[in-house]
Amino acid sequence: MAGSRILGIESSCDETAAAVVERRADGTGVILADVVLSQLEDHAAYGGVVPEIAARAHAEALDRLIEEALTRSGTRLEDVDAIAATSGPGLIGGLIVGLLTGKAIAMATGKPLYAVNHLEGHALTARLTDGLAFPYLLLLVSGGHTQLILVKGVGDYERWGTTIDDALGEAFDKTAKLLGLPYPGGPAVERAAQTGDPKRFVFPRPMVGEARLDFSFSGLKTAVRQAAEKVAPVTDQDIADICASFQNAVSRTLKDRVGRGLARFRERFPDAEQPALVVAGGVAANREVRTTLQAICDAGRFRFVAPPMALCTDNAAMIAWAGLERMAAGLGPDDLTVAPRSRWPLDADAASLIGSGKRGAKA
Ligand code: KG4
Ligand code: ZN
């Protein structure tokens, strides 16, 4: 079979994105164009993503971004083999904008449409960037999700762990807000932590030691608030110490949770020659998180795969690639009546945990 070329559209949260990606006959992929417009500035004043503002911004920018992706990749619409658009999970207004645009293009051009699960986009990115073979373990750590997922094949996932309350990125954002640091909180907390003492405060590490692989971060946020109140008024040094201690607690939690995940993978696939852990999501930008994951992998003799940052955070190249993978696996295309879904777990059998993915907006 000759290669296939797909136009991808992403609009599930606060990034509007379009990409053109090709999958060659040998199964390798190449990104021909990848355009992302962040709405960060539109939402910064509110300290979080405002769904109505996000939906409007997607509607305003998407056409232009699609044109730009086509132009940059030297592709005419009639030359693509299919359209892939995120249809969930995420903020419903944005999903409607992206999916309807995808449907309209599919209808006008007579091309097939792939309605892609945003989480599947994150899950399969490492196959585009590193040609990773199944099975592998994925740690997705973003503003809306904290999940440990066994990736067995295209459309074949097992969720091994998820957060029972806040997502890890959310914990970073809330910690930053409590300390008066700017939004998004992750980079601000990381910066402040550089000059802090990670041992000054001993923060809780919920779930550590438990056999189930779930996460919990709301207790950590409460402990941060109590520490800040205790030393109030906080100095810059207090803030730095709290941030460093927070990151220390996060690292130790990850060490335990992910470490157990790797052990479970080994038990399940004792013959896997090169088992791998993949990280995705905005929190993967954090240097301490990366160093911790690398150390866990070194200790467990796992390969650690961290795709380039631009492909760890939300983008349309991963959506295009997931569409191509589905196409190659014979899964799809979707009917044009397919509906957007604000909630859409990758693993349909996974029990929904109270409070997990509360924001449901970001992945
Ligand atoms: O994947 P992402 O860009 O958007 C979605 O959530 O979909 O992730 C954003 C999250 C935010 O919570 C942000 O604070 C966090 O990733 N983040 C970080 C860092 N950079 C971004 N967290 C910790 N350290 C960072 N350097
Ligand atoms: Zn995402």
Image: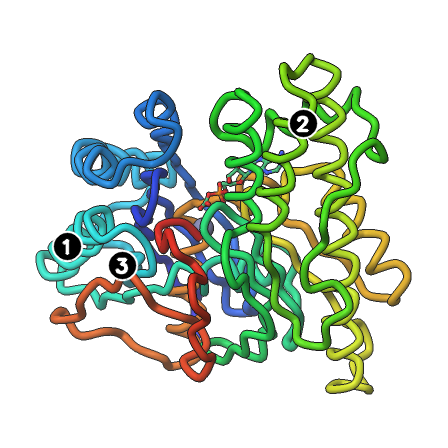
The relative height of residue 219 versus residue 302 in the rendered view (above or below) is: above
The answer to which of marks 3 and 1 sits earlier in the sequence is 3
The residue at the point 27 percent across, 60 percent down is 342
On the image, numbered disc 1 is attached to which residue?
100
The answer to which of marks 2 and 3 sits earlier in the sequence is 3
Residue 353 x %, y %: 46, 71
Which labelled disc corresponds to residue 262? none
**Quadrant of the snapshot with the N terminus:** bottom left
In the image, 235 versus 48, the foreground residue is: 235
Residue 238 x %, y %: 72, 20
Asked if residue 337 lies left or right of residue 10, the reply is: left
The relative height of residue 226 versus residue 311 in the rendered view (above or below) is: above
On the image, numbered disc 3 is attached to which residue?
83
The residue at the point 63 percent across, 14 percent down is 233
Asked if residue 363 lies left or right of residue 284, the reply is: left
The relative height of residue 210 versus residue 187 in the rendered view (above or below) is: below
The alpha-carbon separation of the residues under discs 1 and 2 comes to: 51 Å
Q: Nearer the viewer, mark 1 or mark 2?
A: 2
Element carrying mark 2:
helix
Asked if residue 35 lies left or right of residue 310, the reply is: left
The residue at the point 69 percent across, 13 percent down is 236
Quadrant of the rendered structure where residue 289 is?
A: top right
The alpha-carbon separation of the residues under discs 3 and 1 comes to: 11 Å
The amino acid pointed to by label 1 is: Leu
Q: Nearer the viewer, mark 3 or mark 1?
A: 1
Element carrying mark 3:
strand
Residue 256 x %, y %: 78, 62
On the image, numbered disc 2 is attached to which residue?
230
The amino acid pointed to by label 2 is: Lys
Quadrant of the rendered structure where residue 235 is?
A: top right
